[in-house]
Each structure stands twice: as C-alpha cells, then as structure tokens.
Image: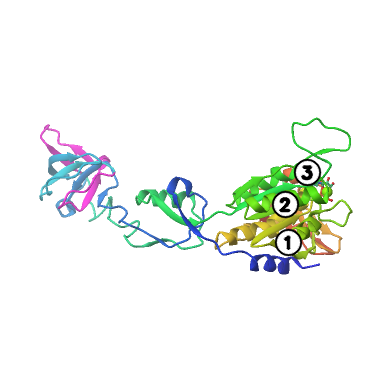
Amino acid sequence: MLELEEARERVLAMIPTWRAESVVLSDALGRIVAEPARAPIDLPAFDNSAMDGYAVRASDLKSATAARPVSLLLCGKIPAGEIPRDELNTGSCVRIFTGSALPRGADAVVMQEDTRPAPDGTAEILFLESVKPWENVRIRGEDVKRGAGLFSPGDRISVGGAGLLAALGVREVRVSRQPLIGVMSTGDELLESGQPLVPGKIYESNRAILAPLLARAGVRPKVFPLVPDTLAATQTALEKAFGECDAVVTTGGVSVGEHDFVKNAFAELGGVMDFWKVAVRPGKPFVFGRWKEKLLFGLPGNPVSALVTFLLLVRPALLRWQGAANIDLPTIQGCLAEPLANQGERRHFMRMAVDAAGTVRSAGFQSSHILSSLAKANGLVDVPARTALRAGAIVSVLQWE
Ligand code: AMP
Ligand code: MG
C-alpha cells in the first residue's frame, strides 16, 4: 500500500506532455496558457480623461481658488470616441468626457464639479481649484505597456484575465489542449436516474459528482453508460472508453470482492497496473494504470471515496496534463469549533464545513457511503492516524466547492 505522496508522484510521473491549441477568447476562460502572451498594444492606447470635465493646461490654473477663480475660454468639446482636432492653446479649455482622448497641449483634466460656467453667459469656464499636471488623465500605457508579458505558460485564464485580453484586442489565445476523460461507473446494483427503484438496487451517483469535477479541472468529461459486474462487460466498456478518450476514470469494482472486475478487465485488455491501494481513508483501493499511452484511474465505488481520491490523485494529474502551474487544491486555514478525532490506522480526509469566518466543523457522519454530510461539506481536513485535534486547533482545509 502506497503513501498518498508517493502515489501522487507516481501518477504525476506518468502524465503525458500536453499540446497547445488556439482558442477564441470567448472560450478561453479557465484554460491554461500554453505559450507566453504579450501585449500587442499600449493600454490605454492614448492619453484620455478619467473624468467628465475640462481639459486644461495645468500651468494656466496655478492661482485658481474658490475665492479667486481663473477663467478659461471654452473652445470645443471632445465626446468619447472622437479624436481632438486642434491643439489646446494656453488660456483655453475643452469640454471633455470620461474616456475622451486628451487634446494635444492639454496636460490635466479638471472635474466638472470644480468649475462653474461664467455668470455672464460668455463662452468661459471658471475654475475654482488648481490642478496638478496629469491629474485626472489616464496616461497611455499606464495599465499595460505594449510588449509587456501578460501570462506565462501554466497560468490559468481568469475572468479578469479574459477582460484584459479583450481590452488589448486579443482574439485568440494559445492554451493547452484539454484531454477528453471518460467517466464510467461499475456495479450491478446501479440504476440510472429515472428508472424505477427496485429492491436491492441504488441510484448511481458517482458520475454526477465526477463529471462536473472533471469539467472544473479543465478537462472535457465524457460520461459512459453503467457497466454491469462481469469481466466481459467491464472489458468491453473499458476498451470502448479507451478508444474514445485520453484517460478513463472508473468507479467501483476495485476492491477484493469476486464481483470486482476493473483490474482484471484492464489486465485482459493489456493494461499495465502501476499501483493499487493508497494509505488513505476514504479511498484505499484506488487503482492507477496505463493502457498504451492512456491512463486508468480506478476509483472506489463509495461516493465519498470516489470524490476524495479524485481530488487527491486525479485532479492534480489532469491539471498537470494541461500544464497548469498550480495543481493543488486551494486551502484555507480555519479554526476547529469542536474536537476532531481519527482513531483509525490510516490518515483520514474528513468532510468538514468551513464558514466565512474560518470556523470549521465536521459536516456529519464520516462513513464513505454517507452523502448527506458530503452535501454539507465544502472542505477536507487531513487528520493523521490515531490523532485527536482539540477545539480551537488551527487546521488547513482543502477546498473543492
Ligand atoms: P465497490 O467499490 O464496487 O465495492 O462499491 C462500494 C460501495 O459503493 C457499494 O455500496 C456500492 O453500491 C457503492 N457504489 C458503487 N458505485 C456507485 C455509484 N456509481 N454510485 C453510488 N454508489 C456506488
Ligand atoms: Mg461494485
């Protein structure tokens, strides 16, 4: 039986090298950058106003105060989207709006609220305050300079990152290809939702957990039909899934019972098992193997075991496959509201609920078939074997929600 860290290293060592493809920006969210991306233009591309107000020469307004306003001749306006035709001469100002290009000669913008129209109705504006050079001006390139590095390979494109690329006029990004991952559940007892519940059978739930987790890990999930507990059916299903996908995630059928066929079916197909069993609870009978250049992740059948082993061993592999720099689950530090004990001989990843204040509580019963506590949980705490943690202890919570 392998320690978790060793199992993880062995999985990661087997991950194929990823390839790049171009995607349009609207499809780039969450994808992993494959090639360095640089800014094709300055952002902003031109000096422009940060306010609705008046473009001025700051030196004209040095003496302006509310008691002794300075008046400047108003000569025109520049709506956003238009280009100013004339240079701004000393002694004059131009009406300007947020985002409008600054005219040549101007070096500051005075916000409208610090001005008044001249009382005599002439084309003059009274300025009640002085202004520093470049005040209220967004300077060309102050956000991003042309040629500046935007993303490095391995970065994940965030919502804000997609916005930045859009603002820079980038239409396509080079990202790593997303592997297609098959997900199938084995078990004679399993029913598809919608089928009538009959004695001895249960509704299948693992694919409903794993397919969205696969998608969240950035890969494309492909869900396969339920697989009965026979060697032949398991072999046929695996062969089909390997034919269509880059890797296959199975659930169930990896324990020691005589109805557990995943390992044998895989071997019959010519798959090479790398390891079986990891010293964690839940999820001990996890299997990892290789079929040609494709991979098998054989998860245990209990839904919580499937989820935990997916998070600990499959998710990092899929992220590494895409070249992601960060392959670890996010963690937050929290404070236990109550004691937490693992009396067992294996480290236990316990389902916890952590709130916004960082208070961590057990999500409920910890047996690996209990779904109600899984539904309440938003984190896992790794409790070493034979360990009791007291209330108030600071714990790291692995998060997946
Ligand atoms: P196994 O790993 O096949 O021995 O299954 C262990 C336990 O998990 C059994 O109680 C199964 O009924 C249950 N189980 C297996 N697969 C699923 C599934 N896809 N959805 C819900 N429960 C499952
Ligand atoms: Mg089974």
Mark 2 or mark 3, which has the lower sequence index?
2
- Secondary structure beneath label 2: helix
User: Residue placed at 67% from the left, 57% from the top?
Assistant: 314
234 lies above or below 324? above
Left or right, 313 with reference to 391: left
Badge 3: few (under 14), some or many (20 or more) residues near its Cα, within 10 Å?
A: some
In the image, what residue type sits under mark 2? Leu
Badge 2: few (under 14), some or many (20 or more) residues near its Cα, within 10 Å?
A: many
In the image, what residue type sits under mark 1? Gly
State the separation of the CA atoms marked 1 and 2: 10 Å
Magenta run includes residue 117: yes
Question: Residue 53, how many percent across, how many down?
Answer: 24, 42
In the image, what residue type sits under mark 3? Leu
- Secondary structure beneath label 3: helix
Left or right, 247 with reference to 18: right
Instruction: Between residue 262 and residue 48, name the one nearer to us.
Output: 262
User: Residue placed at 70% from the left, 42% from the top?
Assistant: 208
Q: Nearer the viewer, mark 3 or mark 1?
A: 1
Q: For mark 3, what is the residue?
A: 371
Query: Which quadrant is home to the N terminus?
Result: bottom right
User: Residue placed at 51% from the left, 53% from the top?
Assistant: 31
Q: Is residue 401 visible?
A: no
Q: Are marks 1 and 2 in contact (CB under 8 Å)?
A: yes
State the separation of the CA atoms marked 2 and 3: 27 Å
Q: For mark 2, what is the residue?
A: 238
Q: How many marks?
A: 3
Magenta stretch: give its range.
Answer: 99-127
Q: Is residue 220 visible?
A: yes
